[in-house]
Amino acid sequence: MHSGVRVAIGQRFTAATGGLPGVFWTMWWGLIVNRLASFVIAFLSLYLVRERGLGPAEAGRILALYGVGFTVAGPLGGLLADRIGRRATMVAGLALGACSVGALAFARAPALLALFAFLAAAPGDLFRPAMSAAVADVVPPADRPRAYGLVYWAVNLALSLGLVIGGLVAERSFVALFLADAGTSLAAAAIVLFRVPETRPRGVVHEPALRGLVKVFADGPFLSFLLLQLAALAVFVQWQLALPIDMAAHGLGPAAYAFLMALNCAGVVLLQPILSPLLHRIDAALLLALSAALFGLGYGVNAVGGSLGVYGVGTALWTVGEVIGFPVASTMVANLAPAALRGRYQGAFAMCWGAAFTIAPIGAGEAIQRLGARALWLICLAVALAVSAGHILTAEPRRRRLAELEAAGVPRALEAGR
């Protein structure tokens, strides 16, 4: 019995991880090292208010600048990945981000805090679109859904461990917290510099910067996908502001909110290896539609009650939605991108994340203040269901676009990109 279980586990592990190139795993471990101490996004608000004595409004403006930097990093990182190479962009972004985070630990003037918060995100997140493009460079199309699933799993595994470590360190020293963040970024930069070769395709005619960006946003099937994902992400990131505010209004404090965040991280870490092999034969449009619907249901259920149990059910639903949808979305971007524009396509997709983190809290705050939290949750449900329908309605143009790329010599994915 025990032997059979071990064999089954070994087979599942091989199915999830086998056959991927060594350079992918080197980048994967570099990502683990980098994200293990990515403390700024989790602890910046607490640092600004508790350690630097800023008021909520001033801290909010600095957090918004961090979001703007996050938004800028997407297209800039994608452009640099296509122009100077994936490796150089990853190393430069990690090194510059480390310097900015280190400076943030010692800054005291609000203007300097704002500057270094912006710089911690703007160059610091150049790594993400460059790595996503590099994964598309080195992983065969049929294996991309699995590869991007492993990338997403690594981020959540490192984040779940890092939040526990970061909470303990923050109780003693925010300076040590941010210096640890900077140190792991430099360690990841060294891994990429010394262990990862340049992966940008050779013999590809690279587009001029402006023309390439125009081509990205003139690609109708990709643009429709991008707008749908932006709307889906705006619903997904309601955990950032609306969820803790609504929980507090129902008498649930930080410990309850931390429990839900731990439930989310644990859910991703446990479910990703299980669901990923089961989903690769299902059409991408259906998975994206299901993911968006689960986001809507996960937040919409909050409208019918305010207990920890209701919030827990909702969190479980949108957690399954992200496990299903996010690797598929990354794969779709890789498959829609011409080889010469992979970085810029990934950068445009990364920009959606930054835009969602910037726009969603503003919209949620206004909705709660003017209409109440229940109305916000119903709006989230309606938006997510509209996105779900949109993915089904726009699937055929994406399929035609993938067929055009295949005919032009750019391989399409065999599973999630169909």
Image (tube, grey):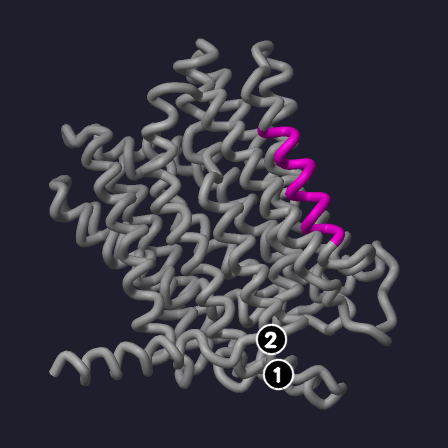
Q: Crowding near pointer 1: few (<14 within 10 Å), some, many (20+)?
A: many
The percent position of residue 194, horizontal first and vertical second, equals 69, 54
Q: Nearer the viewer, residue 170 or 417?
A: 170
Where 141 falls versus 269 (above or below)? below
The amino acid marked with disc number 1 is Arg
Q: Is residue 322 magenta?
A: no
Q: Give the left or right position of residue 100, taking residue 296 as reference.
A: right
Q: What residue range appears in magenta?
A: 88-101
In the structure shown, which secondary structural element does the residue marked by tag 1 occupy? loop
In the structure shown, which secondary structural element does the residue marked by tag 2 occupy? loop
Q: Which mark is residue 139?
A: 2
Q: Is residue 26 visible?
A: yes
Q: Is residue 96 magenta?
A: yes
Q: Which mark is residue 412?
A: 1
User: Earlier along the polypeptide chain: callout 2 or callout 1?
Assistant: 2
Q: Nearer the viewer, mark 2 or mark 1?
A: 2
